[in-house]
Image (cartoon, rainbow, N blue to C red):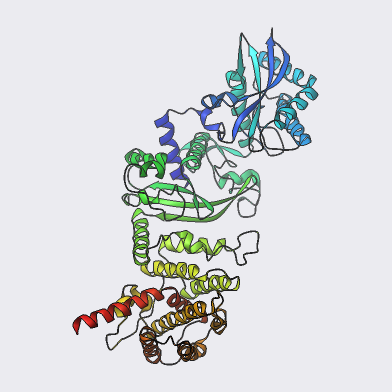
């Protein structure tokens, strides 16, 4: 994966003519940070004079002038520029102390590689800031409080010098000190004349604590070699300074252009070019940088399988298998990162297969299936919970779908029927959950990830064509019998709703919150038939459905070898698709009349 990130970094650096400073400086989200609070100084004969603290608009096209490079969460940044994220006066003042005034503690470093002139420049700036410290803090708090609740700002230093205002990026000393601090930080654990693990070349210096992602750390068991001596930890991941910069830029490119949302879970899409170089795949970069919205303007609407409106997988499915994709699901926790899931080596042909299965389900049920449909069953175990607690199950299913690994049908039925039961208990419309569950089972079955049993049928029956269009989903007599029993039960519930003018039909209690077992289902069919006769509603269509349901139940015999969840799911599916069942009956009756 890191080699792929390096390839992206090298390609975009060369293509866009990017220098080292562009790589190390943090980008600022202009949509959120629209304002700048500038501490204004005036340079006069080598000395500084405090002028004011002013608020101005963020210079989007001159972002490099601010030289924002974040440091530790509790200390100074790499320059006296910082984002203001606090919302209380005392915390804003504390931020000025740490991020602005605190930065000048760098002058205490006796090894600081600067000239006497540069040291005098910084010392004088530090003195005037400390002299007016209280005024600066009060003014910053005042300007910060004037911002709208949704507005954010950065704070920096602005200097009137030689007849014009300049920013930190206009002075070489601040640029040089950024690289000095980076080298000092990363050079604490290093070795000389060793091979870089990324480029494979001998390097005068390799670092052991440099990584583009924060999930790599040397202070946890399992990351340290050499008897847990952190000074020897460079052996785990030796990286030369040049590769470190290239990886940093590659990571930035991925975060800006290949950062997507997967049903509420963020992920990065990382390409690996198996044949050729990124220059041979420039059209792929064009897809990423234009985005699905721009692409859809030129032809048909781009389909989404993840539920993200910026999903570009639809465009990538037509690429050749000379490229593979990694899906990296990361969870950021303050300054750390944790890998939730890493799906490796997914080929475009596999993505194409997944979209074909989606198209099959969409056509069959006139729906719009996405992974969000599956997510509904693997979101929260209890709707009252504040946080999602089923993410690991959902991500495991996604991993199996992309890697073509089988999925336990019993596992899927359990979570699907639980959602249907909860909807019934909370008086929500459980028909939608049933529809989503049917789409999910059809999708996984079409991909061959769920194994469906098949049975033998000795004669043609009226509903054969309807069942056949769902592939292997209804290939056993018991599934067909449960399905038709569900349809007949739904007709009874509709009759009771109509005659009693209620949304809570009495017969619903006989369904035991969809926890019926084999014995219950065998006894349910005659109950439904008797109740329909009481309502004078056991007409031709009901008789046909009851007859066919009985036929399949008898054909199934005893000992169905199905879980309670699975039996109830197919019963609910029949309730949900009752209109399709009745349509078959009416069409068959019309055909008989024509033949007569």
Q: How many marks?
A: 0
In the displayed structure, 510 sits above or below 134; it is below
- The reply to whether residue 156 is visible in this rendering is yes
Query: Closest to the observer: 547 or 538?
Result: 538
- The reply to whether residue 199 is visible in this rendering is no
Query: Closest to the observer: 428 or 505?
Result: 505
Q: Quadrant of residue 471?
A: bottom left
Look at 44% across and 51% down and name the residue there.
326
Q: Quadrant of residue 146?
A: top right
In the displayed structure, 16 sits above or below 480; it is above
Look at 45% across and 76% down and name the residue there.
575
Query: Closest to the observer: 422 or 97?
Result: 422
Quadrant of the frame with the C terminus: bottom left
Classify residue 101 as left or right of residue 208: right
Look at 60% across and 42% down and name the residue there.
209
In the displayed structure, 283 sits above or below 472; it is above
Query: Closest to the observer: 113 or 165?
Result: 165
Image coordinates for residue 196, horizontal then vertical, percent: 50, 40
Residue furthest to the top in view is 45
Classify residue 558 as left or right of residue 150: left
Image coordinates for residue 271, horizontal then vertical, percent: 41, 47
Image coordinates for residue 294, horizontal then vertical, percent: 39, 41
Image coordinates for residue 356, horizontal then vertical, percent: 33, 60
Classify residue 109 as left or right of residue 543: right
Residue furthest to the left in view is 595
């Amino acid at each position: 994966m890191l080699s792929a990130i390096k390839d992206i970094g090298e390609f975009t650096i060369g293509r866009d003519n990017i220098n080292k400073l562009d790589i190390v400086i943090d980008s600022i989200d202009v949509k959120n940070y629209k304002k700048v609070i500038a501490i204004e100084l005036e340079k006069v004969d080598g000395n500084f004079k405090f002028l004011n603290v002013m608020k101005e608009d963020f210079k989007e096209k001159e972002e490099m002038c601010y030289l924002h490079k974040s440091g530790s969460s509790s200390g100074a940044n790499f320059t006296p520029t910082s984002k203001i994220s606090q919302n209380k006066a005392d915390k804003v003042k504390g931020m000025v102390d740490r991020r602005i005034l605190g930065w000048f503690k760098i002058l205490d470093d006796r090894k600081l590689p600067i000239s006497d002139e540069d040291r005098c420049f910084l010392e004088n700036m530090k003195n005037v800031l400390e002299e007016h410290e209280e005024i600066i803090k009060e003014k910053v708090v005042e300007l910060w409080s004037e911002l709208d609740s949704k507005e954010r700002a950065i704070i920096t230093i602005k200097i009137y010098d030689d007849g014009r205002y300049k920013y930190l990026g206009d002075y070489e000393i601040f640029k040089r000190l950024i690289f000095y601090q980076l080298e000092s930080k990363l050079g604490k654990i290093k070795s000389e004349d060793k091979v870089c693990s990324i480029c494979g070349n001998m390097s005068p210096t390799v670092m052991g604590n440099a990584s583009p992602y924060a999930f790599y750390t040397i202070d946890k068991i399992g990351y340290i070699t050499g008897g847990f001596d952190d000074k020897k930890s460079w052996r785990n991941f030796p990286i030369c300074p040049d590769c470190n910069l290239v990886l940093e830029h590659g990571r930035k490119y991925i975060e800006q252009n290949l950062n997507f949302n997967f049903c509420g879970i963020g992920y990065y899409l990382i390409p690996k070019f198996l044949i050729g170089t990124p220059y041979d795949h420039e059209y792929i970069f064009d897809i990423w940088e234009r985005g699905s919205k721009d692409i859809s303007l030129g032809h048909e609407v781009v389909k989404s399988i993840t539920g993200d409106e910026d999903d570009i997988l639809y465009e990538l499915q037509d690429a050749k298998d000379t490229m593979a994709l990694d899906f990296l699901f990361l969870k950021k926790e303050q300054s750390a990162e944790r890998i939730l899931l890493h799906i490796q080596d997914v080929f475009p042909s596999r993505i194409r297969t997944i979209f074909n299965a989606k198209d099959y389900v969409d056509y069959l049920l006139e729906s719009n299936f996405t992974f969000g449909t599956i997510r509904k069953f693997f979101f929260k175990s209890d709707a009252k919970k504040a946080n999602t607690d089923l993410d690991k199950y959902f991500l495991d299913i996604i991993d199996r779908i992309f890697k073509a690994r089988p999925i336990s049908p019993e596992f899927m039925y359990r979570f699907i029927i639980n959602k249907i039961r909860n909807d019934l208990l909370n008086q929500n419309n459980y028909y939608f959950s049933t529809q989503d569950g049917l789409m999910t089972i059809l999708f996984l079955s079409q991909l061959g990830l769920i194994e469906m049993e098949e049975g033998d049928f000795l004669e043609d029956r009226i509903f054969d064509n309807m069942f056949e269009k769902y592939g292997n989903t209804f290939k056993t007599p018991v599934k067909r019998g449960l399905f038709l029993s569900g349809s007949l039960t739904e007709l009874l519930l509709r009759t009771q709703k109509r005659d009693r003018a209620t949304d809570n039909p009495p017969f619903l209690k006989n369904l035991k919150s969809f926890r019926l077992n084999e014995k219950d289902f065998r006894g349910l069919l005659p109950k439904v038939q008797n109740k329909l006769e009481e309502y004078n509603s056991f007409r031709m269509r009901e008789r046909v459905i009851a007859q066919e349901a009985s036929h399949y139940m008898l054909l199934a015999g005893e000992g169905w070898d199905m879980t309670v969840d699975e039996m109830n799911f197919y019963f609910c599916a029949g309730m949900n698709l009752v209109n399709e069942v009745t349509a078959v009956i009416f069409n068959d009756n019309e055909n008989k009349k024509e033949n007569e």
